[in-house]
Image (cartoon, helix red, strand yellow):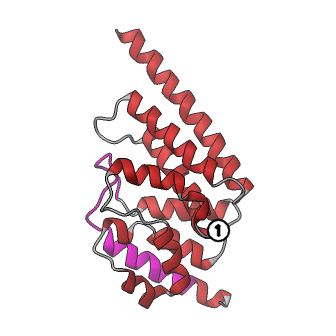
């Protein structure tokens, strides 16, 4: 795709995703949901991933899973490459939450390369939010469990993009340190 075609495609993707997510917020109940896929695309771009299909899929990665978007809509509007990456990142909502989490670990390495990179960026964004803008009612223990699970998923994605993987490790380490401080603070107030 020519560079002149990149900007209009990204604008179309952003518009489509913003319409699909317009009434959603992140689990903290405050932040507009659309900020998440934009942040995932930004993390990818900052870590050497500049493929238009991947960046488009990053912005669309939760539309099938969390909105009324059909695979056919993605295919019709953005093509087969984008659809395949989105499908590779879409959890099967027919499975229990536990089964979905296990499947993310066990199937991680079988995803296409672009989907593996997207998954790493998604985990980076999610663990930052777990610490910085946590879901309502999440205990420190639940946050620690989420960090541990994310680490297991990303470990299975090893070899995808070293820069992205190193960024994940750095963010994970920072998030664990912040959780430790939160635990110490809680102990001090008891």
What residue is shown at x 65% (from left), y 76% (from top)?
51
- Residue drawn at point x = 40 percent, y = 78 percent: 15
Q: Could you tell me residue 25's position as x and y percent?
A: 31, 56
Q: Is residue 8 magenta?
A: yes
**Which stretch did the figure color magenta?**
7-32
Screen quadrant of the N terminus: bottom right
- Residue 62 is covered by the magenta coloring: no
| Left or right: where 165 falls relative to 138 | right
The percent position of residue 110, horizontal first and vertical second, equals 59, 64
- In the image, residue 54 sits, relative to residue 42, either above or below, namely below
Residue depicted at 30% across the width and 69% down the height: 67
In the depicted view, which residue is nearer to us: 147 or 158? 158
Relative placement, left or right, of 6 versus 30 is right
Disc 1 on helix, strand or loop? helix
Picture quadrant of residue 164: bottom right
Q: Is residue 27 left or right of residue 12?
A: left
Q: How many marks?
A: 1
Which quadrant does the C terminus fall into? top left
Q: Which residue is mark 1?
A: 113
Report whether residue 10 is seen: no
Q: Quadrant of residue 35?
A: bottom left
Q: Residue furthest left?
A: 23
């Amino acid at each position: 795709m020519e560079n002149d075609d990149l900007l209009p495609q990204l604008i179309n993707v952003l518009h489509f995703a913003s319409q699909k997510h317009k009434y959603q917020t992140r689990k903290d109940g405050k932040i507009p949901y659309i900020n998440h896929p934009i942040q995932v695309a930004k993390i990818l771009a900052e870590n050497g991933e500049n493929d238009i299909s991947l960046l488009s899929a990053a912005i669309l990665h939760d539309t099938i899973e969390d909105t009324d978007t059909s695979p056919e809509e993605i295919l019709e509007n953005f093509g087969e490459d984008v659809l395949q990456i989105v499908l590779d990142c879409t959890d099967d909502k027919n499975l229990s939450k536990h089964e979905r989490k296990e499947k993310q670990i066990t199937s991680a390495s079988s995803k296409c390369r672009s989907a593996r990179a997207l998954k790493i960026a998604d985990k980076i964004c999610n663990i930052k939010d777990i610490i910085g803008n946590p879901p309502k009612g999440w205990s420190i223990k639940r946050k620690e469990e989420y960090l541990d699970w994310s680490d297991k998923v990303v470990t299975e994605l090893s070899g995808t993009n070293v820069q992205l993987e190193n960024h994940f490790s750095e963010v994970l380490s920072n998030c664990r340190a912040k959780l430790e401080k939160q635990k110490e603070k809680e102990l001090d107030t008891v």
